[in-house]
Image: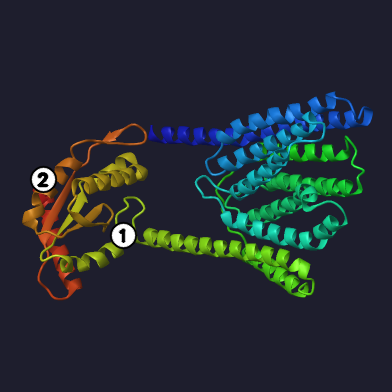
Amino acid sequence: MRSEDLLSTTMSSRIAALSLGTQPTIRFVAVALIASTHLALYAAGLAISPGASWLNFLYYLLPVAVALVSFQKAFRGRPGGRLGLALVAAAVALWMLEDLSHTLTSGHPPAAAEGLRYLGYLALALAIPRFGLSRESRADWHALLDGTVIFVVSATVAWRFLFTPLAADGGGLGDWFPIFGYPFADLGLLVMLLLTFCQRETSESWLPFGLLAGAAVILLGSDVGYLLWSISGALPDRSVLDLGWLAANWLLLSAVFAYRATPNRGESRAWIRSFRSALPYVATITFAAIALLDASSRGGIPVLLGGLAVAIVILRVRQWLTHADNIRFLQQTEYLANHDHLTGFLTHRAWFEQAMLAPGEASSASLAVIDVDHFKTVNDAYGHPAGDLVLGEVATRLQHALPSGRYFGRIGGEEFGVVFLEPVVDVRAEVEAAVASVGSDPILLNDGDAVQVSISAGLANFGVLADPRRRLLATYERADALLYEAKRSGRNRLAA
């Protein structure tokens, strides 16, 4: 009967996994078909009647509708990438609103409308570091900071050698800055995508990243074309650029529906990690060299030094985050090395090291050795996963029932050790109450069954030997002997 239950559970999990894998694929194909049809209709409309008013309606209707559906998909997705998906959909919505403001104002939108497009870039910049995450991971803000360094370096160099001459020839900085920043924002997105893809934490296929990268490349080409046409003054009312921007929006939305994160089974190669770590530093050093070579032009020094200062500040923030991550990783590694994964108690080695020092913390101390009665019967009747659950629940009940316990350890398969900084006379009643508490209520298993367990305990005072190791071993032997005395007396009791 139990094997049939196991087979049923396995089949159900496989069917659920298949449904999870199939559903995003169906939605992605549907969005891809809608996008292809929409782009074909819009391209035909541009060819047949470039100035028709109905093109505006066709341009905005479907992407906005799909963006709204994308929000629903995002918030029903996996926690690891949920925010990233929502931010991608938000970027598309913001860009559509900015385009709509151009249409409604006949090409003369308010200055705040340009801010919508940059807010869209900000949403994408925040989304990309989360796009390669597994279920419960944090965002990889290193990719965001590294991409920002590349963006600052490239934008500042371009400002010095391209933007400043253009502004000197005609128009002020304010006339050129809004459209000049778009290509470099696109470049920053591409760098962030590269860095995130190289260091992603999931076995996600290349498709979502490829769609995002395709969108960034199309945006870069369209924005460069927009800049060049603006400089020449020959920008048509409806151009192929609209088709490029529309295609980029569709690629972004398609990436939302193609995304499905699963835990990664492998690690990125060492040279990729080294390349990613070195890239922002190489860019900053190169930037500093450019600033020194350009020192002869006094007009460019403030711009270059300002950009260099920003890049260095970002790198310092990155170093601080790296240092904080390293400390957190070491703390997690130390915790995992010293704690049992089933119970959260100290491992045998860690418990032994700390228990040796316990008598030095108080004038007298005691040790309880606790064992789960007939635990082999639980494993044989319900299986080892059920036995693991029982051990975890017993440990939880012990910790709640023994507030005076200082060091809790799992020192054997179903055997626990608890060190008290008080003598036996002070903690005996507490340990007796814990024995009764653990056995008072049955433990509910995952399949709905309930198992009644009890524990036996031996409690002994620490001895007076000078050597800490010998003192702990002698105390443990006495407590262990008392434990078996409790078992011989009928179990579910304390011997002290």
Q: Is residue 276 left or right of residue 401?
A: right
Q: Secondary structure at mark 2?
A: loop
Q: Nearer the viewer, mark 2 or mark 1?
A: 1
Q: How is the image coloured?
A: rainbow
Q: Quadrant of the C terminus?
A: bottom left
Residue 196 figure quarter: bottom right
Question: Circle 1 is placed at which residue position?
Answer: 347
The picture places residue 304, in percent across and down from the top left corner, at 72, 66
Task: Identify the residue at image location x=91%, y=30%.
Answer: 50
The picture places residue 479, in percent across and down from the top left corner, at 13, 59
375, above or below 38, in the image: below
- Closest to the observer, 363 or 121: 121
Question: Circle 2 is placed at which residue position?
Answer: 490
The picture places residue 166, in percent across and down from the top left corner, at 85, 56
Dot 2: few (<14), some (14–19), or many (≥20) neighbours within 10 Å?
A: few
Q: Amino acid at mark 1?
A: Thr
Q: Earlier in the sequence, mark 2 or mark 1?
A: 1
Task: Identify the residue at image location x=22%, y=41%.
Answer: 453
Q: Quadrant of the N terminus?
A: top left
